[in-house]
Amino acid sequence: MIKFKNEISALLNQVDNKIVIDENDPDYYNGPEVTYMDKSLFTRYKRLIFNSEYSRNIDDKQAEIQFRLTYNNRVLDLFRTRNYLIGCGIVLAVGISLSIYFTTFENYHISPFSYECPAGITTPLIPLYTFMFITLAFLVPLIFLTVGFTDAYGMQVELIITMVTTFFLVAGLVIYNQLATPAMLLYATGYVIVLPVFILQQVFLIINPLFKVIKIKKQTGGKVIGKGGNARNAAAISSRKEQFEGLLAYPAGFSRLTKAALETFCPENVEFLKDYQLLKFRVCSLVVSNSNENENIGEEKTDAESDRDTKNSSQTSLDGKMEPSKKVDVDHSSLLVDSVYENEPNPEEEIDMDQLISGELVPPLPITIPEAVYKMGLILDLQMMNDSQGKKERTTPKMTLVPQNLKDDFWKFYIKYIQEDALLAVNIPIKIIAPISDAVKNEKYTLGIFDDALEEVLNSLYTNTYPIMLKTL
């Protein structure tokens, strides 16, 4: 799943940057056009199972990655918490029904009087064992793991060990109980073979994860017992939070956070931050470019008027002083972006991501887009730009409308990370998604439309990913 998300992210960036494939490349396919969706469903499944190489055609590659990602999601949906609990409930009901059915036998008792079975019950014990062990092995750990536990935290190895040992030990139990005669051993001794699997499940699936959760809670803000503990803990949380926010503006640290995001199965969160920072840069660069263009037009008009008035006012200019209102105020806050794009920004030109992350081009994270526009002194220029496009509203920076030129960029960001079933959908609650979706539906894009989503993504990284990153240092 992580592999597909990374591949679709790289492909979308390739499409956004308009990277074209060289037709002179020896690997370039120039045969008859057969699109991926023209192939049969069997062929597409076969390519998915055997992990075949992607087509060189960007459209086909995108279609195939999306197909693989969609069907992997469908398989994972079968194991979601709700479906899992429903399945366990069905298994439990069937197991109880079997037990009730067995009580209809005249000589069947909960506490057997002998080790021989007068009722002749032999084969039905196998489904009974199957349902019993499935219920016990999966229902109890699931209840513990679904309470406030969202990430795997390195449990892949433990889960694999548990599943493998469960398979062999349960098989050993059934074989042992069927082959061992009552004259040789007690019938119940077969459960000794299965006992280790319950110990492994208790340790790996319950005790170990709970200890990890407790340890992480202590690192990220759990309550400290003792006099004055709350004050000390609040100071520790504040310092830790500041370290995390400082990490976002440090390219090397951001790279480590990216690796930790892969380990905690949320690479889309880091991709969200990168694209948000890029969106911030595009907003600021467009406003600066438009402002410079207006200044150039104003300077041309001023030069023409000054040439006409020079002869009449030359003496006055020499003797008099310039009025304060005539002085030109230079907006130094926008010079940084202006130094990168002297003219209209070229969308095909690559932007140095390290410079973008470190705040050399625009204010770094966790500063939002409206905060960046305000800090750089561009809010008035943006409002004037909106005025020229017929948007006369005056409001806070967060609710300021986006220029018409940037609506497409905001829409692409939405369909990539926010909308339902997005290819790189971030894990944010519906109460945040709903207002964003409504704004997009009404085409009312504001500077702060993604601010709540950004805050949720940062909280997720701080709570789940940042502690894992610290462990790997």
Image (cartoon, rainbow, N blue to C red):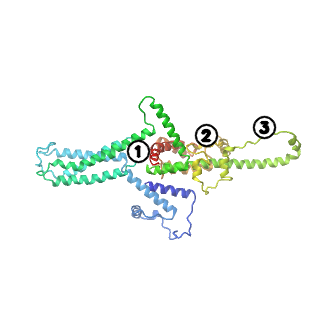
Q: Position of residue 424 (x, y in %)?
A: 48, 51
Q: Of helix, strand and loop, which one carries label 3?
A: helix
Percent across and percent down for residue 329 are: 73, 42
Left or right: residue 328 compared with residue 7: right
Which numbered disc flags the more N-terminal residue, 2 or 1?
1
Q: Position of residue 191 (x, y in %)?
A: 21, 48
Residue assigned mark 1: 150
Q: Amino acid at mark 1?
A: Thr
Looking at the picture, tell me which residue is in the foreground, 428 or 273.
273
Label disc, if present, on residue 324 of the rendered structure:
3
Nearest to the observer: residue 417 or residue 155? 155
For the residues labelled 3 and 1, the Cα–Cα distance comes to 62 Å
- In this rendering, the answer to whether 414 lies above or below 25 is above
Looking at the image, residue 363 sits to the left or right of residue 82; the answer is right
Circle on res. 397: 2
Query: Does residue 202 appear in the picture of this structure?
Result: yes
The quarter of the displayed image where residue 92 is located: top left
Spatial distance from mark 3 to mark 2, Cα to Cα? Answer: 29 Å
In primary-sequence order, the first of circles 3 and 2 is 3
| Mark 3 crowdedness (10 Å alpha carbons): few <14, some 14-19, many ≥20 | few
| Dot placed on the residue nearer the N-terminal end, 3 or 1 | 1
- Residue type beneath disc 2: Pro
Residues under labels 2 and 1: Cα distance?
Answer: 35 Å
- The image quarter in which residue 1 lies: bottom left
Q: Is residue 408 visible?
A: no
Asked if the residue under mark 1 is in contact with the one under mark 2, i.e. CB atoms within 8 Å, the reply is no
**Among all residues in the image, which is located at the extreme top?**
227
Task: Using residue 142 as the reference point, say whether residue 21 is left or right of it.
Answer: right
At horizontal 60% and vertical 45% (from top left) the residue drawn is: 363
Q: Secondary structure beneath disc 2?
A: helix
